[in-house]
Amino acid sequence: MTVLPLRPPRRVRHETVTLAHGGGGSAMRDLVEDVFVSAFAVHEEGQPLEDQARLSLAELMARGDRLAFTTDSFVVDPLEFAGGDIGKLAVCGTVNDLAVGGAVPVALSCAVVIEEGMAVATLRRIAASIARTAREAGVRVVTGDTKVVARGACDKLFITTSGVGVIRTGLDLGIARARPGDVVLINGPLGDHGAAIMAARGELAVSAPVASDCAPLNGMIGALLDAAPGTRLIRDATRGGLAAVLNEMAEASNIGVRVAESAIPIRPEVRGFCDLLGLDPLYLGNEGVAVAVVPPEQADAALAALRAHPLGVLAAAIGTATAERPGRVVMDTPFGGTRIVDMLVGDPLPRIC
């Protein structure tokens, strides 16, 4: 962001965003100060904004011995939906990408690409949602950027967030660390986010009384790691859903994975929605579901820690890692049979995040 003079914040005088709001002049300063700086509180009062955030190395290293850094872009359609919006999604997505690697999220950047003509009121709501979700996750938005493009050059609003976190000393999580006998856990029901997005689009004349599960998972993951310090890996089941995570783990760790369909929590509303549209909840994207693999002797403690957290009340042990069929995921069905769970081919629901 540009350096701002020490003066009272400027105010946006337009109801919609114009190309002038991306031109680097006073209109851009109005937008940045009024909509973003005021919401994010990215600098100390009385201090100008610089072109970069400055983080104390001493404070960071007091929390662990390695930095984690991640970035992601968000292009969800529609921008606002039951249970969240693109702003909440951007914060949760980046915070969760840090947390599943064992990092404590510390700071975020937020860059926005805005289409000319977007309502300033909508932009304010999304900025407020970003700030609110960051506070919930215990992180700060410390720097960012704003661009405005002509009508049709993007679809309303795209957001890119990057995050920095600190990995606690001695922790080593990784997708290739699963071992035969390990237990696979998930913290909650599948498919809520995918169903909520599809229902919000209204393209199929069907509705689902379900909200997105979008949530920052770092607090819950911290409790899990305290209870089960030998945890092998954690992944959030976003695009591609649970099926993608299990297949990536099986391939990277050179193990088989066997899960029980009856053990996987899925809300009746989501199951009915998927049955109606011919979708499989295993492949629907989630924004508040984490998959954890823990050694068998720590599985009970890990499951108890998840269930003690508000985001893990419906946590379940859904399967195990095996030495059989390396690289394959096998599901036991309620009817006594089995089926192979492959990776997703294509994209049944684009632009969910």
Image (cartoon, rainbow, N blue to C red):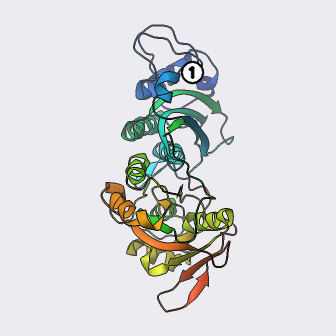
Instruction: In the displayed orientation, state which residue is furthest to the bottom.
Output: 336
Q: Is residue 302 left or right of residue 28?
A: left
Residue 46 percent across, percent down from the top left = 41, 9
Element marked by disc 1 = helix
Position of 81 with respect to 305 (left or right) is: right
> Which residue is rendered at x = 67% and y = 42% of the image?
152
Asked whether 125 or 333 is in front, the reply is 333
Q: Residue at x 47, y 88 (%)?
A: 334
- Compared across the picture, whether 127 is left or right of 97 comes to left
Dot 1, crowdedness within 10 Å: few (<14), some or many (≥20)?
Answer: many
Can the viewer see residue 213 in this picture? Answer: yes
Please state which amino acid type lies under the numbered disc 1: Met
Residue 134: x and y in percent read 42, 37
Q: Quadrant of residue 47?
A: top left
Observer-nearest of 134 and 120: 134
Tell me residue 287's x, y (percent). Answer: 49, 55
> Which residue shows up at 55% across the image and 75% down it?
280
Q: Give x and y (percent) for residue 57.
A: 53, 23
> How many badges with numbers are in the image?
1
**In this view, which residue lies farthest toward the top?**
6
Nearer to us in this view, 61 or 84: 61
Answer yes or no: is residue 56 visible.
no
Q: Which residue is mark 1?
A: 28
Quadrant of the frame with the N terminus: top right
Occupied quadrant, residue 351 = bottom right
Q: Nearer the viewer, residue 274 or 123?
A: 274
Would you place residue 82 above or below residue 124 in this image? below
